[in-house]
């Protein structure tokens, strides 16, 4: 198949899509460049090489989401466009947030402040910034609620976001014994990522 160069143009999408067999599945034609092919998030979807792909998802009998990817046209040096033609970042992300240091369980004296921290960086396309949304669980991790910066804690003190990436902290200016075993985690996002990344949950205890 002769394409119009190694870009994600609509003309190339039409040509590559001719290789998709008729099916009841809602298949997408996805362009994956060299950078996108190297990202772990894309590899989990089966998009592990540069080129044009046929892609769709389905739910199996146990309720789990499955991914089906078929390489239509392989490209040795697929061009990473600074301005993409295809709106497929929800499937083939340009970049992803990778957590290198997870929040750690923390023990403090009654009434003392507490800090939870995460270290993360962006992999993939250059540029971008990371947004953080800290969350708390008061029921042993069954459910989590977002915490606003400066929002009062349940038992006095307040939550404070601190730092810039690669390090980001949640600082509790005051704690209370009733907060024992509360869990804290952070949801990280960046433009061009296929979905949010959620850290491990760290537990607050008292010395």
Image (tube, rainbow, N blue to C red):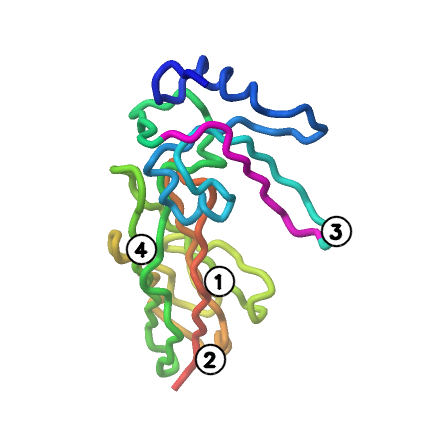
Q: Which residue is mark 4?
A: 120
Q: Residue, x 50% and y 43% (percent of image)?
A: 46
Instruction: Say which label, 3 or 2, has the lower sequence index.
Output: 3
Q: Secondary structure at mark 1?
A: strand
Residue assigned mark 2: 177
Distance between the Cα atoms at labels 4 and 3? Answer: 35 Å
- Provide the secondary structure element on which disc 4 rests: strand
Distance of label 2 from label 1 (alpha carbons): 16 Å
Q: Earlier in the sequence, mark 2 or mark 1?
A: 1
Instruction: Indicate which label's residue lies in the foreground, 4 or 3.
Output: 3
Task: Give the main secondary structure, helix, strand or loop, of the magenta stretch.
Answer: strand
Would you say 9 lies left or right of 143 here? Answer: left
For the residue pair 72 and 195, the one nearer the viewer reads as 72
The quadrant of the rendering that contains the C terminus is bottom left
Q: Are marks 3 and 1 in contact (CB under 8 Å)?
A: no
Q: Which residue is mark 3?
A: 61
Cα gap from disc 1 to disc 4, whole angstroms? 19 Å
Q: Nearer the viewer, residue 202 or 74?
A: 74
Give the structural element (helix, strand or loop) at label 3: loop
How many numbered circles are shown? 4
Name the image quarter holding residue 134.
bottom left
Residue 44 point in image, percent of width and height: 49, 48
Q: Residue furthest front?
A: 1
Crowding near the residue tagged with mark 3, few <14, some 14–19, many ≥20 C-alpha atoms within 10 Å: few
Q: Is residue 69 magenta?
A: yes
Instruction: Name the mark nearer the viewer: 3 or 1.
Output: 3
Tell me the distance, in whole angstroms, between the alpha carbons under discs 3 and 1.
33 Å
Q: Which residues are magenta?
A: 63-75
Residue drawn at x 43%, y 70% as measured from the top left: 202
Of the numbered discs 2 and 4, the one sitting upstream in the chain is 4
Residue 36 covered by magenta stretch = no
Residue 167 image point, x, y percent: 26, 58
């Amino acid at each position: 198949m002769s394409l119009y160069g190694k870009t994600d143009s609509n003309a190339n999408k039409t040509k590559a899509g001719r290789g998709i067999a008729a099916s009841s599945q809602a298949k997408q034609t996805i362009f994956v460049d060299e950078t996108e092919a190297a990202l772990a998030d894309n590899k989990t979807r089966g998009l592990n090489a540069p080129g044009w792909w046929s892609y769709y998802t389905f739910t199996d009998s146990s309720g789990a989401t499955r991914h089906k990817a078929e390489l239509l046209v392989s490209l040795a040096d697929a061009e990473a466009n600074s301005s993409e033609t295809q709106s497929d970042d929800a499937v083939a992300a340009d970049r992803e947030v990778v957590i290198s240091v997870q929040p750690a369980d923390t023990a403090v004296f009654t009434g003392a402040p507490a800090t939870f921290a995460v270290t993360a960086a962006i992999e993939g396309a250059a540029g971008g910034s990371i947004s953080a949304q800290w969350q708390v669980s008061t029921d042993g991790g069954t459910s989590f609620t977002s915490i606003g910066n400066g929002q009062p804690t349940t038992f006095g003190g307040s939550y404070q976001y601190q730092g810039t990436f690669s390090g980001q902290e949640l600082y509790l200016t005051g704690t209370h014994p009733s907060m024992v075993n509360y869990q804290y985690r952070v949801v990280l996002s960046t433009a061009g990522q296929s979905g949010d990344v959620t850290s491990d949950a760290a537990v607050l205890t008292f010395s």
